[in-house]
Amino acid sequence: MLANRSLPTTDLLPPPAGNRFAGTVNPVPAEVLARSTWQPGCPVAAGELRYLTLSFWGFDGHAHTGEILVNASVADAVVTVFGQLFAAKFPIEEMRVTAPAELTAPPTGDGNNTNAFVCRPARGQTNWSAHAYGLAIDVDPFCNPYTKGDLVLPELASAYLDRGNPRPGMITPGDRTVAAFSAIGWTWGGTWTTPKDRMHFSSNGR
């Protein structure tokens, strides 16, 4: 299972009608903000974030509806990207707002949540991550692990370091996922030398 990810998606929101893509952009509801990682010390105000609901295809072959928080300045462009991923039937296991407990959870799990806003520093640094501004998205992290030297995150995702063995959910140079983000001016961490952040797309190159 860990070498060939194909887990079903647990629905948090109603699936899209007629298996058609739907994307919404709204101010962040109070209850969503309360279960997110946002707090007053974050580098972006709550009013600068938007709550997106987005259709996606799961590894189970069914259409689902996910949720993410992004910076208001990129909200419409992000909807466009996920519309293209839906049209390409690129599989996503889950898409939900990151919870505060996940900030301190050990990285040993096998999570595969596609997420955007997370109020945290960049990995191994003290400066804010692009995620803390809502300007970055991690897509299928388990299928597209982060590596720096011998470090692999998530730690159970080592089977996905073999990029010559393409499997559903993997992002590869020049594929539709990279093309969709490139079209809105975002860069892919899979092109970095070290670290190599295969899951990561950002609007500011960080």
Image (cartoon, grey):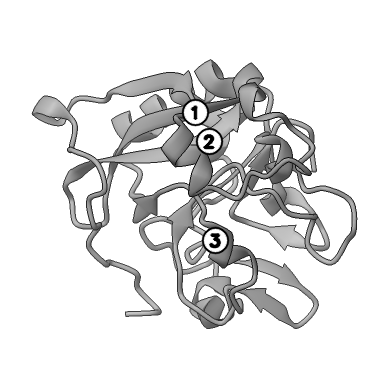
Look at mark 3 in the image and give the residue it sits on: 144
Q: Is residue 130 visible?
A: yes
In front of the other: label 2 or label 3?
A: 2
Residue type of the residue flagged with mark 2:
Leu
- Tell me the distance, in whole angstroms, between the alpha carbons under discs 2 and 1: 8 Å
Out of 51 and 91, give the one closest to the viewer.
51
Labels 2 and 3 touching (C-beta < 8 A) = no
Q: Is residue 10 left or right of residue 102?
A: left
Residue type of the residue flagged with mark 3:
Asn
Look at mark 2 in the image and give the residue it sits on: 69
Q: Secondary structure at mark 1?
A: loop
Residue type of the residue flagged with mark 1:
Val
- Tell me the distance, in whole angstroms, between the alpha carbons under discs 2 and 3: 21 Å
Look at mark 1 in the image and give the residue it sits on: 28
Identified at 55% across, 66% down, the residue is: 101
- Tell me the distance, in whole angstroms, between the alpha carbons under discs 3 and 1: 28 Å
Labels 2 and 1 touching (C-beta < 8 A) = yes
